[in-house]
Image (tube, rainbow, N blue to C red):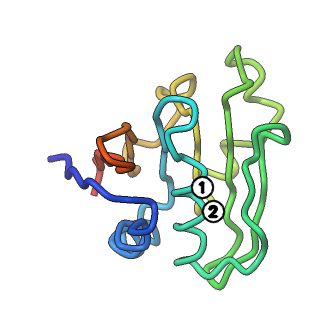
Amino acid sequence: MPKNLILKNSELNILANFLFKPILTKKIITLSGELGAGKTTLAKEICKVLQVYDEVTSPSYNILNIYESENGPIYHYDLYRIKEKNEIENIAIDDAFSNYITLIEWPELIKDMLPKDNIRIKIRDYANDKREYIIDGI
C-alpha cells in the first residue's frame, strides 16, 4: 500500500532516512513528477544518506551520473531526453539494475523493463512550498 508524505524541501532528510534500509535491499528507486517537481533534489538527499561525498547533480544532459559511496557505486539516470526505447541500449541500464543502487528520474518509458521489486516515488506540488511524496514498493 502506498505511503503519502507531505514535506518541505528542508524536511527531505526524513524521507531519505526512511528509505535507507529499503534502498539497500531493493536497489532501484524511480522518481516521477512534473518538470521541476523536485526529483533531483530528492535524489541528492538520498545520496547524502547513502554517504555519497561527490557533488550530486542532475544527469539531464549526461543521462547518467555515477557516484561512489560507502554502499558501492550509485547510478543516477535522468531519462527525460530519451524518446525511444532503442536509445536505452546505449546507456547500460540493465547492468545497473542487477548490480548497483540505481536512481531513475523520468522512468515512464522503461516501466516494463524495471524489475518488479523496486521503490516508486511520485512527487507532486502541494500548498505552501510543500510537496507530496507518494511512495510505493516498500
Indicate the secondary structure of the residue bearing disc 2.
Answer: loop
Please report the residue visible at 72 percent of the width from the left and 23 percent of the height from the top.
Answer: 82
Proximity of marks 2 and 1: CB atoms separated by less than 8 Å:
yes
**Residue 67 x/y as whole percent:** 75, 67
Could you tell whether 107 is left or right of 96 in the image? Answer: left
On residue 100, which mark appears?
2
Camera-side residue of 55 and 63: 55
On residue 115, which mark appears?
none
* Mark 1 residue crowding within 10 angstroms, few (<14) / some (14–19) / many (20+): many
Please report the residue visible at 44 percent of the width from the left and 66 percent of the height from the top.
Answer: 23
Could you tell whether 11 is left or right of 84 in the image? Answer: left
Indicate the secondary structure of the residue bearing disc 1.
Answer: strand
- Name the amino acid type tagged 2: Tyr
> Split into 4 quadrants, where in the image is the C terminus?
bottom left
In the rendered image, the vertical position of residue 105 relative to residue 96, given as above or below: above
- Name the amino acid type tagged 1: Thr
Camera-side residue of 98 and 58: 58
Residue furthest toward the front?
Answer: 128
CA separation in Å, label 2 and label 1: 6 Å
Please report the residue visible at 47 percent of the width from the left and 36 percent of the height from the top.
Answer: 32
Label 1: which residue? 102
Q: Which of marks 2 and 1 is in front?
A: 1
